Image (tube, rainbow, N blue to C red):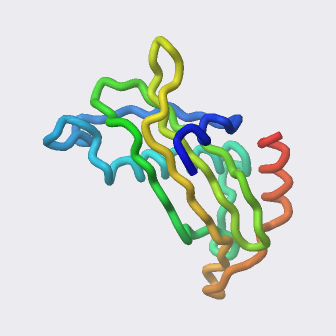
Amino acid sequence: MKPEDILQYTFNHAHPIQVRYNDIDLAGHVNNAVYHEFFDLGRTFYFKEVLGEKPFTYEQNIVIAQSNTTYVKEVFLEDELQIVSKIIRFGNKSFDMIQALLRNTPEGAELTTYNLTTFVCMNYSKHEPQLIPLVWKDKITKFEK
């Protein structure tokens, strides 16, 4: 996926991100490891808003199977940011979420970083993958349309 492909998506979920002083490295920009915290925060609020207050249980949960991050532009302490998130694919037991970290500028949103994550539904009690719950698919599909 290329940077120009990301903003072709319609994102129905956005969450503001505050850069903290300890997010900055010696080069003066956000350290690459911190971006994953931003993406985690975005998906936490996405799932809470779309699936409800406490959607995950020990028997019905998710695990990250793959995560790919592309860094497009540096992010700095004073930047105003938002994470946008969208589920773009459902399988039987897995689904993909695309997320983008956008910098708010007078000209509009500027792409700084994006991430594609594959999740697998898991039953932690049995230590095995499981089918995506139909209620999750229904809620997500309605939200994304």
The structure residue drawn at horizontal position 27% and vertical position 42%, both measured from the top left corner, is 23
Closer-to-camera residue (24/7): 7
Image position of 109 with respect to 98: above or below: above
Could you say where residue 15 lies in the image, as x and y percent from the top left? Answer: 55, 34
In this view, the residue in front, 12 or 51, is: 12
Q: Where's residue 20, x and y in %?
A: 29, 35
Q: Can the viewer see residue 12?
A: no
- The residue furthest top is 106
In the image shown, does 118 or 51 lie closer to the viewer? 118
Does any portion of residue 24 appear in the rendered image? Answer: yes
Image point (65%, 85%), residue name: 128
| Quadrant in the picture for residue 134 | bottom right
Residue 135 image offset from top left, x and y in percent:
84, 59
Marks counted in the figure total 0
Please state if 120 lies on the left or on the right of 79 as rendered.
Answer: right
Tell me the residue at 79%/72% (across/down).
92
Is 16 above or below relative to 50? above
> What residue is at 69 percent from the left and 63 percent from the top?
95
Residue 10 is drawn in which quadrant?
top right
